[in-house]
Image (tube, rainbow, N blue to C red):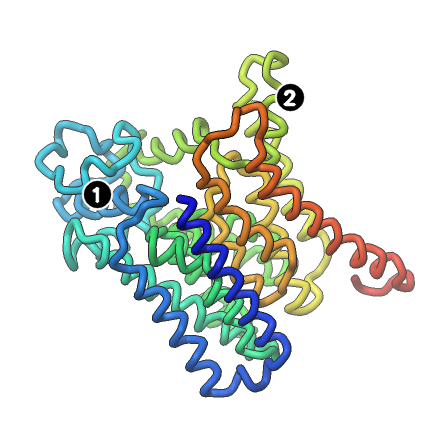
Amino acid sequence: MPRYLIALAGAFAFYGLAGIVVVRAPDACSSRAGLAAILGVALAARLSLVSAEPTLSTDLFRYLWDGKVAAAGHNPYAFAPDAPELAPLRGPFWHRISYRSVRTPYPPVAQALFRLAAGIRQDDPIALKLLLVAADLAAVLALIGLLRRARRPAAHALLYAWNPLVISETALSGHVDALGVALFLLALLALERDDAAGQTAGALLLGLSLAAKPYALAALPVIARWRGLRVASLALAVAALTLAPYLDAGEHLMGGARAMARRWRNNGSLYEILYPALVGRVPFPGRTSRRILAGLLAAGCLLLARRPVDGREDLWRRLYHAFLLSLFTSPVAHPWYLVWLAPFLSLSPAASGFAFTALVSIKHLPRWLPPSIPVRLWVQYAPVYLLLAWEWWPRRKRRAGKPEGSEG
């Protein structure tokens, strides 16, 4: 693990230098040759990790299992991996599957990807990783499209395409977040159009993103403020409809998701402040902490949607803050969750986001520190919160200085 973190730090140093070049010479980097170089390096970096065995997470092996279960004709929501009905399916990666007594928490569009990978080749991490890399590169192309529509340098897509955390968590660890992010960015690109076809396509893609991983729920109030309740409602309906093929799982359909929401706790920031404060004061401190933070997330996302959206920059900044808030209020904040935040470093660069993506992997360090000294949490989150305050304060002063009646 120390070797990985040292390599990651070196990659971030190179990434920082490349980011400086892109910011200082955006036009040259946005030429056809410049974009070809950006995409070529992005592809090469990902392909260099596809064949490597995942060592930071075991999620990929659960994906492979779910795909194998579906390919065998079973409903992946109906049985936990250790169910005797599925014993004949146990293969070479069985020992790498975590939480074998818990049913799958992964939504239907993610399951469709797992089933597709199993159809290509079962028990093969490379097949699934290649599909996720393809989704990740689609996200890069969507970013280029969004930047061009905003008349911004397309080379700023490098700030996502070359982000070492994104590359590592997608091509090395093979996390399905890459699929959800790609669908979300394609939805934004479609919603840029003012016609009915664009709005419908955007709502469809947004619903599929929610059904790949529901992190985009935090963005729905801002999307509704930008494009109307119809788009948000249609997206929710599409996400709900993707559950239809799995309804025979009955009460077990959401069992895995409920277990994760109730019990998982890992690397959260506000949760790790709130939970110890409630221990001994309320009967169920974990449950109470989750409810308080869920209320804080809902209130914060609604607050972000309180004013009309004032152009693309305002939209992107609000979406960035919505995803950031969802990470702060979650009891679980794995490094791969930041793949949802990373695209906005291309669209609306923020020092707090760059710091977060660079520091979050510290959570992988061995647990040699006593629990009463959460140094890893402080090292990760203190710079992010300080930078966020530094970004927010000048903006607040600028808004306060605008004449009365002007749009913020």
Where residue 240 appears, as percent x and y from the top left, is: 39, 47
Q: Specify which label sits upstream in the sequence, 2 or 1.
A: 1
Q: Secondary structure at mark 1?
A: helix
**Image vertical order of residue 270 relative to residue 142, above or below:** above
Residue type (three-letter) at the residue carrying disc 1: Trp
Q: Which residue has dot 1 on it?
A: 65
Name which residue lies at 21% across and 56% down: 117
- In this view of the protein, can residue 208 be seen by the observer? no
Tell me if mark 1 has few (under 14), some (14-19) or many (20+) residues whose alpha carbon lies within 10 angstroms of its own: many
- Residue highlighted by disc 2: 277
23 versus 8 height, above or below: below
Amino acid type at mark 2: Ala
Q: Position of residue 393 (x, y in %)?
A: 79, 53
Relative placement, left or right, of 176 versus 13 is: left
Please, what secondary structure does the residue beneath circle 2 have? Answer: helix
| 310 in relation to 325, above or below | below
Compared with 288, 70 (above or below) is: below
Label 2 neighbourhood size at 10 Å, few (<14), some (14-19), many (20+)? few
Q: Quadrant of residue 293?
A: top right
At horizontal 19% and vertical 41% (from top left) the residue drawn is 93
Left or right: where 1 falls relative to 76: right
Which mark is drawn over residue 192? none
Q: On the rendered image, what quadrant is the C terminus found in?
A: bottom right
> What's the residue at 81%, 57% (across, down)?
394
Whole-percent x, y for residue 362 in the image: 50, 43
Please give the count of numbered marks on the rendered protein: 2
**Whole-Å distance between the Cαs marked 2 and 1?**
39 Å
Toward the viewer: 277 or 201? Answer: 277
